[in-house]
Amino acid sequence: MATRVIPPRILRNLRYNTATKPLKSVQPPLSPSLSPSPCLPPPTSTVLRPAATPDLNFHDVEKLFSHVRTTALLRSAAVLHATAVEPLVDFGSWLLRSNLVNVPGLRELIFATVRATFYDHFCAGEDAPTAASKIQELNHAGLRGMLVYGVEDALDNDACDRNFRGFLRTIDVSRSLPPSSVSFVIVKITAICPMSLLERMSDLLRWQHKDPSFSLPWKQDCFPIFSESSPLYHTRTRPEPLTPEEERDLELAMQRFLELCQKCAQSNIPLLVDAEHTSVQPAIDYFTYSSAIVNNKDDNAIVYGTIQTYLKDAKERLLLTVTAAEKMGIPMGFKLVRGAYMSSETKLAESLGYQSPIHDTIDDTHECFNACSSYMLEKVANGPGGVVLATHNVESGKLAAAKAHELGIGKVNHKVEFAQLHGMSEALSFGLSNAGFQVSKYMPFGPVETVMPYLLRRAEENRGLLAASGFDRQLMRKELGRRLKSAVF
Ligand SMILES: Cc1cc2nc3c(=O)[nH]c(=O)nc-3n(C[C@H](O)[C@H](O)[C@H](O)COP(=O)(O)OP(=O)(O)OC[C@H]3O[C@@H](n4cnc5c(N)ncnc54)[C@H](O)[C@@H]3O)c2cc1C
C-alpha cells in the first residue's frame, strides 16, 4: 500500500489536546476525524501538576498500597533503592556479563543472589505456572498481567522453534487463568524469525519505499510501514531479492506467527507485538500489519502493534496506519511506548553519518507520546481498535487519565489499558487502578539465565527510568513509616 504525505496542518493538530475544563464537564461530541480542538502546550517535564486528575490520588499512601503486604513493600523499596545506585547497577551489569558467571560455585552464588533480589522483583517467575500464580496475586490487588516469555533474539530456525513453543505455552497458561486477570500475551518477532532475515526484509521494504516499482513477490497486503520522514539510511544500495532458502524461512516464521495469532483469537486474548531497533522494525511492522488484516475482525483487535514515540516519524506513521486500517474496516490496536533503544539508535545513525531518528529533546518525546495517546484515545472512544498506554511517566499517566475521563472511556473499557513493567511504578499502577482504569503489569518470565540479559538491557537502556523510580521509593517510604508508626503507637 502506498504511503501518503500527511498535511502539516493535521500533524500540528495531533498534539495533546485535553481541555482545561473541569473533568466532570460534559464534552461536545468528537468528530471521528482529527479534532481541531484547541491544543494545550506540550507537557515540558515529568513534574506533577496536581490539578490534572483529581481521581489519581498519590497522597493517600495507605489506600495506594493497601493491597501490598509490608514484607513485599519493604523488599520493593530496598530493590528500587539498590537499582538507583548507579555504581551498583554498573557493577551488577559487569558481573553478569563477565566470565565469573561461568565459574562453578560462583555461578550458583551469583544467580541465587540475583534471583532473590533483582529477578524476583522484576520478573514473574522461572516458569509459566509460577508466573500464572503471580498474575493471580496481582489480580487480587486489582491489576492484570501481560505475560512475556523472556527470550532473546533468535539466530536460526531451531531457536525460533524453541521460542515458538514457549510462546504457545504462554498462551495456554494465559487462557487457563480467569479472563479478567490477563490482558495480553506478548510476542517478540525477533524470537520467532531469524534476525538476519528480519534485517534483509527490512532492507527490501525500505528499498521498495524508495522505489515503488521494486517488486517483493513475498509481500502480502499490509498497512503503510513508512512515512515520508522515516529513516531509510540503513539501506544504501539496492538489496538482492530473498533467496529461495530465505523465502522458506520467511514462510516458516509467518506460519509460527499466524499460529500464535489464531490461538490468541480462539482464546480471545489479544497478542501484542513488541517493537525493537529501527534496523528490523520495518519487518516487524510487516508481520504485525499483514496478520492484523487477516485476524482483526469486527470490533475485535487481536493483533496489536507497538509505536515508539521517541522516533521522529512516530506520529506520521501512527496516522497513516490508523487511516489505512479505518479505510479497510480493520480494527487496529497499538501499544504506545517511548522506546528503549535510544543509545544504540543514535550510535548507529552517527556511524553512518546521519542524524539520530530519535527526537532532539526529551520534551519532544514527551510531547509525541502524549499527542499519540490523545489521538488513540479519541479514536477508540469513537470507533473500533484499542490502545495500551505503556509508560511509567506520571505526567503522561495523568494526562491520559484526564483525557479518557473527558471522553467518557476508561473505566472497565476494554479498549484502553495502562501498562507498567512488573516491579516498576507501583504508585502509578495502583493510582490508575484505584481511579477505575484497567492496568496491567508487563511480566517477563523464564529461567534466570534466560531472562537476565533482557533485564540488563532494560536496566542499561533505561537508566533514566530506574532513576525515575524515585517517586515510587518516596511513596513507599512514606507508607512504610506510616505502618511502622501505627504498629508502635
Ligand atoms: C509495558 C511496557 C512495554 C514496553 N514495550 C516496549 C517495546 O515493545 N519496545 C520498546 O522499545 N520499549 C518498550 N518499553 C520501554 C519504553 O519504551 C521505555 O523505555 C520506558 O518505559 C521509559 O519510558 P516511559 O514512558 O516510562 O517514560 P519516562 O519514565 O519519562 O522515561 C523517559 C525516558 O525516555 C528516554 N528518552 C526518550 N526520548 C528521549 C530524548 N529525545 N532525549 C532524551 N531521553 C529520551 C530517556 O531514556 C528517559 O529516561 C515498554 C515499557 C513498558 C512499561
Image: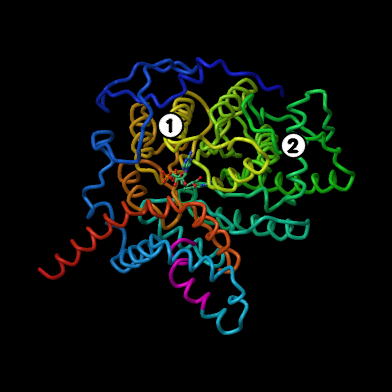
In the image, is residue 111 part of the stretch drawn in magenta? yes
How crowded is the residue under tag 2: few (<14 C-alpha within 10 Å), some, or many (20+)?
A: some
Residue 284: x and y in percent read 67, 41
Q: Earlier in the sequence, mark 2 or mark 1?
A: 2
Of residues 386 and 18, which is closer to you in this image?
A: 18
* Mark 2 or 1: the one toward you: 2
Q: Position of residue 87 (x, y in %)?
A: 43, 65
Q: Which residue has dot 1 on it?
A: 367
Q: Along the horizontal axis of the image, is 132 left or right of 345?
A: left
Answer with left or right where residue 211 lies relative to residue 468. Answer: right
Locate residue 182, reporting x and y percent: 49, 50
Magenta-tinted stretch: 110-123
Q: Does residue 271 appear anywhere in the picture?
A: no
Residue picked out by circle 2: 235
Q: Is residue 299 magenta?
A: no
Main SS, magenta region, reads: helix
* Residue 114 against residue 319 in the figure, above or below: below
Residue 431: image x %, image y %? 31, 46
Q: Residue at x 60, y 65 (%)?
A: 450
Which residue is painted at 56% across and 45% down in the image? 269
Q: Quadrant of the C terminus?
A: bottom left
Secondary structure type for disc 1: helix
Q: Of the numbered discs in the image, which one, if any, rests on residue 350?
A: none
Above or below — where is 71 with respect to 180? below
Mark 2 secondary-structure assignment: loop
- Tell whether 482 sits left or right of 191: left
Q: Which of the 4 quarters of the picture holds residue 451? A: bottom right
Mark 2 belongs to which amino acid? Thr
Residue drawn 51% across and 80% down?
A: 109
Corner quadrant of residue 76: bottom left
Residue furthest to the right in view is 244
For the N terminus, which image quadrant? top right
